[in-house]
Amino acid sequence: MLCTATFALYSQENELPVRYFASTTDFLENKLHEEEATAIVLERGEKYLRIKNILNAATKTKSRTGNWAWAVVTNNDTLINMQFTIEISAPGFYMKPDVFGHYTLFILDKETFLAYERARTNTSMALGDLAIHDSASWGGNWPTANNEKRKIIFLNRDRPTLAAAGKCKNSRGYLLTKSLLADIFFKNKIDKNLEDITVEELVEIMTMLNAQY
Protein backbone atom coordinates (compact mmCIF):
# COMPACT_ATOMS: atom_id res chain seq x y z
CA MET A 1 0.00 0.00 0.00
CA LEU A 2 1.36 3.39 -0.96
CA CYS A 3 -0.09 5.33 1.95
CA THR A 4 -2.52 4.97 4.82
CA ALA A 5 -4.85 7.72 3.63
CA THR A 6 -7.04 7.03 0.63
CA PHE A 7 -6.22 10.45 -0.80
CA ALA A 8 -3.71 13.19 -0.19
CA LEU A 9 -3.28 16.31 -2.29
CA TYR A 10 0.03 17.91 -1.42
CA SER A 11 0.39 21.66 -1.09
CA GLN A 12 4.12 21.13 -1.60
CA GLU A 13 5.92 18.77 -3.91
CA ASN A 14 7.30 15.61 -2.30
CA GLU A 15 10.24 13.46 -3.31
CA LEU A 16 9.89 9.69 -3.52
CA PRO A 17 12.66 7.20 -4.38
CA VAL A 18 11.63 5.01 -7.31
CA ARG A 19 12.99 2.49 -9.76
CA TYR A 20 11.37 1.92 -13.13
CA PHE A 21 10.80 -0.34 -16.09
CA ALA A 22 11.53 1.62 -19.24
CA SER A 23 9.11 -0.51 -21.29
CA THR A 24 6.68 -3.41 -21.07
CA THR A 25 9.31 -5.53 -22.76
CA ASP A 26 11.70 -4.78 -19.90
CA PHE A 27 8.99 -5.58 -17.36
CA LEU A 28 8.25 -8.95 -18.93
CA GLU A 29 11.96 -9.70 -18.86
CA ASN A 30 12.20 -8.42 -15.26
CA LYS A 31 14.82 -5.83 -16.25
CA LEU A 32 14.61 -2.84 -13.95
CA HIS A 33 16.44 0.16 -15.36
CA GLU A 34 19.80 0.64 -13.68
CA GLU A 35 19.12 4.30 -12.90
CA GLU A 36 18.20 5.14 -9.32
CA ALA A 37 15.57 7.85 -9.55
CA THR A 38 13.55 10.31 -7.54
CA ALA A 39 9.93 11.09 -8.38
CA ILE A 40 8.61 14.58 -7.71
CA VAL A 41 5.11 13.72 -6.51
CA LEU A 42 2.26 16.19 -6.86
CA GLU A 43 -0.46 13.94 -5.50
CA ARG A 44 -0.85 10.42 -4.23
CA GLY A 45 -3.61 8.07 -3.23
CA GLU A 46 -3.92 4.46 -2.22
CA LYS A 47 -3.93 3.35 -5.86
CA TYR A 48 -2.07 6.07 -7.71
CA LEU A 49 0.77 8.55 -7.95
CA ARG A 50 0.65 11.77 -9.88
CA ILE A 51 4.23 12.65 -10.77
CA LYS A 52 5.52 15.98 -12.04
CA ASN A 53 8.99 14.74 -12.99
CA ILE A 54 11.34 11.82 -12.50
CA LEU A 55 14.90 12.87 -11.72
CA ASN A 56 18.21 11.09 -11.59
CA ALA A 57 18.68 10.58 -7.86
CA ALA A 58 22.38 11.51 -7.92
CA THR A 59 22.39 14.53 -10.24
CA LYS A 60 18.83 15.78 -9.62
CA THR A 61 18.51 16.36 -13.36
CA LYS A 62 15.46 15.30 -15.34
CA SER A 63 15.58 11.65 -16.41
CA ARG A 64 14.45 11.41 -20.01
CA THR A 65 14.13 7.62 -19.84
CA GLY A 66 12.46 7.73 -16.45
CA ASN A 67 9.78 10.20 -17.53
CA TRP A 68 8.81 7.86 -20.37
CA ALA A 69 8.88 4.75 -18.19
CA TRP A 70 6.10 2.21 -18.66
CA ALA A 71 6.00 1.56 -14.90
CA VAL A 72 7.56 2.76 -11.67
CA VAL A 73 8.30 0.66 -8.61
CA THR A 74 8.16 1.94 -5.05
CA ASN A 75 7.65 0.13 -1.75
CA ASN A 76 7.34 -3.13 -3.72
CA ASP A 77 4.36 -1.74 -5.63
CA THR A 78 4.36 -1.52 -9.43
CA LEU A 79 2.36 1.37 -10.88
CA ILE A 80 1.67 1.67 -14.61
CA ASN A 81 2.06 4.92 -16.56
CA MET A 82 -1.33 6.02 -17.88
CA GLN A 83 0.41 8.06 -20.55
CA PHE A 84 0.16 4.99 -22.77
CA THR A 85 -3.63 4.69 -22.67
CA ILE A 86 -5.53 5.28 -25.89
CA GLU A 87 -7.71 8.43 -26.16
CA ILE A 88 -7.60 9.06 -22.40
CA SER A 89 -3.86 9.52 -21.93
CA ALA A 90 -2.81 11.02 -18.59
CA PRO A 91 0.95 11.72 -18.61
CA GLY A 92 2.55 11.50 -15.20
CA PHE A 93 -0.34 9.51 -13.72
CA TYR A 94 0.67 6.06 -12.48
CA MET A 95 -1.84 3.50 -11.26
CA LYS A 96 -1.60 0.29 -9.26
CA PRO A 97 -3.60 -2.42 -11.07
CA ASP A 98 -6.54 -4.11 -9.36
CA VAL A 99 -5.91 -7.20 -11.47
CA PHE A 100 -2.36 -7.65 -12.75
CA GLY A 101 -1.54 -10.32 -15.27
CA HIS A 102 -2.10 -11.20 -18.92
CA TYR A 103 -5.37 -9.30 -18.56
CA THR A 104 -4.84 -6.22 -16.40
CA LEU A 105 -7.58 -4.03 -14.94
CA PHE A 106 -7.50 -0.62 -13.32
CA ILE A 107 -10.76 0.16 -11.53
CA LEU A 108 -11.41 3.86 -11.02
CA ASP A 109 -13.56 4.83 -8.08
CA LYS A 110 -14.74 8.42 -8.17
CA GLU A 111 -11.83 9.69 -6.08
CA THR A 112 -9.24 8.08 -8.33
CA PHE A 113 -11.14 9.16 -11.41
CA LEU A 114 -11.10 12.80 -10.29
CA ALA A 115 -7.34 12.58 -9.75
CA TYR A 116 -7.06 11.09 -13.24
CA GLU A 117 -9.05 14.05 -14.57
CA ARG A 118 -6.71 16.49 -12.84
CA ALA A 119 -3.75 14.86 -14.56
CA ARG A 120 -5.48 15.14 -17.92
CA THR A 121 -6.51 18.76 -17.25
CA ASN A 122 -2.85 19.69 -17.01
CA THR A 123 -2.24 18.34 -20.48
CA SER A 124 -4.98 18.35 -23.12
CA MET A 125 -8.37 18.39 -21.42
CA ALA A 126 -10.73 21.20 -22.32
CA LEU A 127 -12.95 22.87 -19.75
CA GLY A 128 -15.99 21.24 -21.26
CA ASP A 129 -14.57 17.81 -20.46
CA LEU A 130 -14.32 18.29 -16.70
CA ALA A 131 -17.46 16.31 -15.90
CA ILE A 132 -16.52 13.20 -17.83
CA HIS A 133 -17.11 10.75 -14.99
CA ASP A 134 -20.70 10.45 -16.21
CA SER A 135 -19.97 11.38 -19.81
CA ALA A 136 -20.53 9.14 -22.81
CA SER A 137 -17.15 10.31 -24.14
CA TRP A 138 -15.54 7.90 -21.69
CA GLY A 139 -17.83 5.02 -22.56
CA GLY A 140 -20.07 3.05 -20.23
CA ASN A 141 -19.88 2.69 -16.51
CA TRP A 142 -19.62 -0.71 -14.83
CA PRO A 143 -21.81 -1.32 -11.77
CA THR A 144 -20.48 -2.67 -8.50
CA ALA A 145 -22.45 -5.06 -6.31
CA ASN A 146 -23.62 -1.95 -4.44
CA ASN A 147 -24.72 -0.36 -7.73
CA GLU A 148 -21.99 2.27 -7.71
CA LYS A 149 -20.46 3.31 -11.02
CA ARG A 150 -16.88 2.55 -12.00
CA LYS A 151 -14.76 3.23 -15.05
CA ILE A 152 -12.28 0.48 -15.90
CA ILE A 153 -9.08 0.69 -17.93
CA PHE A 154 -7.91 -2.55 -19.52
CA LEU A 155 -4.59 -3.59 -21.00
CA ASN A 156 -3.21 -6.83 -22.33
CA ARG A 157 0.07 -6.84 -20.44
CA ASP A 158 1.71 -9.64 -22.40
CA ARG A 159 0.99 -8.22 -25.86
CA PRO A 160 3.02 -4.99 -26.14
CA THR A 161 2.44 -3.28 -29.47
CA LEU A 162 3.40 0.38 -29.05
CA ALA A 163 6.99 1.09 -30.07
CA ALA A 164 9.12 2.39 -27.21
CA ALA A 165 12.86 2.99 -26.93
CA GLY A 166 15.08 0.83 -29.13
CA LYS A 167 13.46 -2.52 -29.89
CA CYS A 168 11.26 -2.38 -26.80
CA LYS A 169 7.50 -2.10 -26.91
CA ASN A 170 4.75 -1.02 -24.55
CA SER A 171 1.32 -2.42 -23.81
CA ARG A 172 -1.39 0.19 -24.19
CA GLY A 173 -4.42 0.75 -22.02
CA TYR A 174 -7.97 1.07 -23.29
CA LEU A 175 -11.20 2.08 -21.66
CA LEU A 176 -13.04 -1.18 -21.08
CA THR A 177 -16.26 -1.15 -23.09
CA LYS A 178 -18.84 -3.85 -23.56
CA SER A 179 -17.64 -4.50 -27.10
CA LEU A 180 -14.06 -4.96 -25.92
CA LEU A 181 -15.17 -7.25 -23.10
CA ALA A 182 -17.32 -9.22 -25.53
CA ASP A 183 -14.23 -9.88 -27.67
CA ILE A 184 -12.29 -11.09 -24.62
CA PHE A 185 -15.13 -13.36 -23.55
CA PHE A 186 -15.54 -14.76 -27.07
CA LYS A 187 -11.82 -15.54 -27.31
CA ASN A 188 -11.88 -17.31 -23.96
CA LYS A 189 -15.27 -19.00 -24.42
CA ILE A 190 -16.89 -17.18 -21.51
CA ASP A 191 -20.68 -17.28 -21.64
CA LYS A 192 -21.85 -14.33 -19.57
CA ASN A 193 -24.54 -11.71 -20.03
CA LEU A 194 -22.69 -8.40 -20.24
CA GLU A 195 -25.76 -6.45 -19.18
CA ASP A 196 -25.72 -8.07 -15.73
CA ILE A 197 -22.01 -8.28 -14.99
CA THR A 198 -20.58 -6.44 -11.98
CA VAL A 199 -17.10 -5.11 -11.26
CA GLU A 200 -16.60 -7.81 -8.65
CA GLU A 201 -17.50 -10.53 -11.18
CA LEU A 202 -15.11 -9.00 -13.71
CA VAL A 203 -12.28 -9.18 -11.19
CA GLU A 204 -13.04 -12.86 -10.51
CA ILE A 205 -13.24 -13.74 -14.21
CA MET A 206 -10.04 -11.91 -15.18
CA THR A 207 -8.17 -13.44 -12.25
CA MET A 208 -9.36 -16.88 -13.34
CA LEU A 209 -8.30 -16.24 -16.96
CA ASN A 210 -4.90 -14.96 -15.88
CA ALA A 211 -4.22 -18.27 -14.13
CA GLN A 212 -4.49 -19.94 -17.55
CA TYR A 213 -1.81 -17.79 -19.21
Image: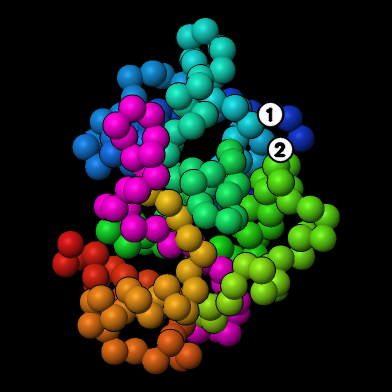
Against 41, residue 91 (above or below) is below
- Mark 2 — residue? 10
Q: Give the range drawn in magenta.
A: 145-170
- Kindly indicate the quadrant of the structure image that contains residue 185: bottom left
Is 83 situated left or right of 129 in this image?
A: left
Q: Do the residues labelled 2 and 1 touch (CB within 8 Å)?
A: yes
Against 41, residue 84 (above or below) is below
Give residue 80's position: percent from left, percent from top: 44, 45
Image mark count: 2
- Amino acid type, mark 2: Tyr
154 inside magenta stretch? yes
Residue sitting at 66 percent across and 68 percent down? 137
Residue 188 appearing in the image: yes
Give residue 51's position: percent from left, percent from top: 60, 35
Against 190, residue 86 (above or below) is above
Give residue 152's position: percent from left, percent from top: 51, 66
Residue 2 appearing in the image: no
Residue sitting at 53 percent across and 78 percent down? 142
Residues packed near mark 2 inside 10 Å, few (<14), some (14 to 19) or many (20 plus): few
Helix, strand or loop for disc 2: strand
Q: Nearer the viewer, residue 27 or 185?
A: 185
Is 129 situated left or right of 64 in this image?
A: right
Q: Which of 205 and 22 is in front in this view?
A: 22
Residue sitting at 59 percent across and 72 percent down? 139
141 inside magenta stretch? no
Residues packed near mark 1 inside 10 Å, few (<14), some (14 to 19) or many (20 plus): some
Residue lying farthest to the right in this orientation? 127
- Mark 1 — residue? 13
Q: Which of 5 and 56 is in front in this view?
A: 56
Give residue 120's position: percent from left, percent from top: 68, 48
- Amino acid type, mark 1: Glu
